[in-house]
Image (cartoon, rainbow, N blue to C red):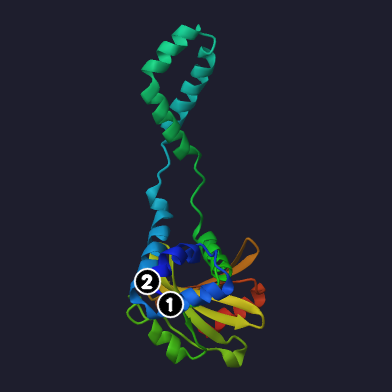
Amino acid sequence: MDCTLHRHLLEAYLDGELGFERTLEVEAHLASCRVCSSEVQSWKDIRVAMQDSNLYHRAPVQLEEKLRARLSQENRSKRMPWFESWIWAGGGAAFATALLLISFVITRPAAPSPAQDIVTSHIRSLMADHLMDVVSTDQHTVKPWFDGKLDFAPPVQDFTSDGYPLAGGRLDYLENRKVAVLIYHRALHIINLYVWPAQDNGSSTVRAQTVQGYNIISWKKNGFEFRAVSDLNTAELRDFALLFTP
């Protein structure tokens, strides 16, 4: 694929709108073209940054109460003669504009939880035909692939003998930082394992939760945070986690 065509395809590729064959064609081009690959990564970083909950702030409770009281007062003022209402509207246009903007902030839904973010990332990886950046069952191939792409070296292991073969890895963005994602299989089920440095070298017990029908197993070990998500049942997903925490 020629670079002159990339602007017609990259946006559709990022939105998951290309067919399977066209997606493979674009990904093959990205693997060999540093310029296009860098541009795609920049677009991904911008999209992730725009979802940062720190960009939004909830209005103080006192302000919300004042606005609601003012709205009630406005409802009562509808009985005023039309010319008085017109005078008030002319003098209060700036206030009305601010009211609309602040009301948007007040009614904005709460930011998704970290667990919801992980499930969303898991679903997106399955729908966008971009589950892996590096495809290999060899941990000695997957682990070096992350060199220079992250500020840490993720612990990569293959558990084929235990029924959880390594399939590859990719980069993702969670909790305001780049993370490593290791992909494993269990029969026909896919496990996305998210890994990033912990704040300390301590360990934690394995915890389980379910979000949107997907099971999430969380634990901390040897200075790393681990989150495994899959539609695999909780018992087998716990067994998978225990392979990292003997």
Given residues 87 and 98, the one toward you in this image is 87
In the rendered image, residue 239, in percent from the top left (x then y), is placed at 61, 81
Given residues 83 and 139, the one toward you in this image is 83
Q: Amino acid at mark 2?
A: Cys
Residue denoted by label 2: 36
In the rendered image, residue 194, in percent from the top left (x then y), is placed at 48, 73
The residue depicted at 42 percent of the width and 85 percent of the height is: 143
Crowding at dot 1, Cα within 10 Å, few <14 / some 14-19 / many 20+, comes out as some
Mark 1 or mark 2: name the one nearer the start of the chain: 1
The answer to whether residue 131 of the structure is visible from this angle is no
Label 1 SS: helix
Label 2 SS: helix
Quadrant placement of the N terminus: bottom left
Examine the rendered structure and indicate whether residue 102 appears above or below residue 219: above
Given residues 78 and 14, the one toward you in this image is 14
Examine the rendered structure and indicate whether residue 26 appears above or below residue 72: below
In the rendered image, residue 5, in percent from the top left (x then y), is placed at 42, 69
The residue depicted at 46 percent of the width and 79 percent of the height is: 28
- Within the image, what quadrant is residue 230 found in? bottom right
The residue depicted at 51 percent of the width and 57 percent of the height is: 113
* 103 with respect to 177 (left or right): right
Q: Residue 29's mark?
A: 1
The residue depicted at 37 percent of the width and 16 percent of the height is: 91
In the rendered image, residue 136, in percent from the top left (x then y), is placed at 50, 87
Is there CB contact under 8 Å for labels 1 and 2? yes
